[in-house]
Image (cartoon, rainbow, N blue to C red):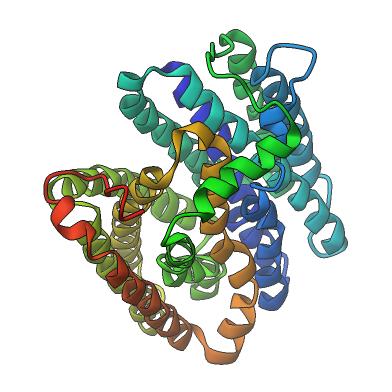
Amino acid sequence: MLTTFVMGFSSGMPLLLTISVLQIWMREEGVDLSTIGLMALVGLPYTLKFIWAPILDRFTLPFLGRRRGWLVLIQLLLALAIASLGLSNPVESPWTIAFLALLVTFFSASQDIVIDAYRREHLSENELGMGSSLYVYGYRTGMLLASGGGLILADSLGFATVYMLMGLCMSIGIITTLMSPEPTVTAKPPSSLKAAVVEPFKEYFTRDSAWTILLFILLYKLGDTLASAMTSPFYVDLGFSSTEIGVTVKFFGFWATLIGAFLGGALIIKLGIYRALWLFGLLQMASTAGFAVLAQTGYNMNLLAAVIGFENLTAGMGTAAYMAFMAALTDKRFTATQYALLTSLMGVPRTLISAPSGYLAEIMGWTEFFILCTLIALPGLWLLRHFSSWHSQTDQSAQPSHQAK
């Protein structure tokens, strides 16, 4: 369980180093919103990781075993990429920053693939629930260190030093990997690269609602994700300092997200996945609208705390239902690759669709931009109607039926 927690920490820490922390660094250096918005494209590896996931499933490196060998190599390269970001200047070398950030997201996405597979293979069936919870806590702790802690340290040490320190923090994950046992797996790995690539996708796309499910995954959190892509420069423009953002937004939001995840999990058991997705989707819309209210009010620490708390609470609830939805769709024979496919699609709004968010914010203004993000959530809720057959089944269980898949 401790291994699961620390691996979650290693997965969560790199994410915001290429999103909010990098955005705030660039904005404080005077980089324009359009360029900052385009930096969302460096997150493409999170969206495309299903492409090389079969390679990590099929081949084994000649040291440490099938999972740990890949994991140590990837973590070493990830640590170097993070530290290298601190050696560049966002104004003088924007393309270098973009390339290094792309390397960070590529190695981070690769690490996620291996850790997901390790967790599912190493934990027994009755340990998966607790193991997944501890993984999420570790993930959020890593995000808190990188964003909240990183932003607070940046005010005194500078962003360059922060990135060097975060690269050093990856040693925690490396040591844990070296000390952890290699999972014992009875099932044989794919016999060929072709089998590793073809079979997981063949099984999924022969389902009746395969494309509708993928479209829903793409759209359900679109409004929430599009708004989140620009909240960091939004806070800077309202006059909040890095320390205020780090303490209020990151630390306070961290606990609100954990409470939301707990509350979401409890409500999923009571309501079932279908009704929970409806409730949490509507709450996410309301929380996004809160940013429009903050834009009209201006600098206000109390309102900032309220808006961020509500947004993170509803995001935690929505993520709980979202992850339960995707887990219910995964065939256990192809968990790693199919889960990579679904989570890759989940990352599309954060990368491709969020790329023009800076242009939209500049053209429309902050208030109108966040109103647009609120309304963009409606198509995902409309698609949710196609899963109404889950309603009666999830009254007794949070798992959808095979027919619903």
Residue 36 at x, y = what percent?
68, 69
Which residue is at the front of the view, 48 or 156?
48
Which residue is at the front of the view, 398 or 30?
398
Q: Is residue 297 left or right of residue 191?
A: left
Q: Is residue 380 left or right of residue 35?
A: left
How many callouts does the rendering have?
0
Q: Residue furthest bottom?
A: 363
Q: Quadrant of residue 126?
A: top left
Give above or below for 294 relative to 306: below
User: Can residue 386 be seen by looking at this rendering?
Assistant: yes
Give above or below for 388 relative to 49: below
User: Can residue 9 be seen by looking at this rendering?
Assistant: no
Which residue is at the front of the view, 379 or 194?
194
| Residue depicted at 73% across the width and 39% down the height | 194
- Where is the N terminus found, in terms of image quarters? top left
Give above or below for 82 relative to 246: above
Q: Quadrant of residue 371?
A: bottom left
| Residue depicted at 65% across the width and 18% down the height | 68
| Residue depicted at 73% across the width and 71% down the height | 31
Residue 259 at x, y = what percent?
26, 45
| Residue depicted at 50% across the width and 54% down the height | 206
Residue 256 at x, y = what percent?
30, 49
Residue 181 at x, y = what percent?
56, 9
Q: Is residue 282 left or right of residue 125?
A: left
Which residue is at the front of the view, 4 or 236?
4
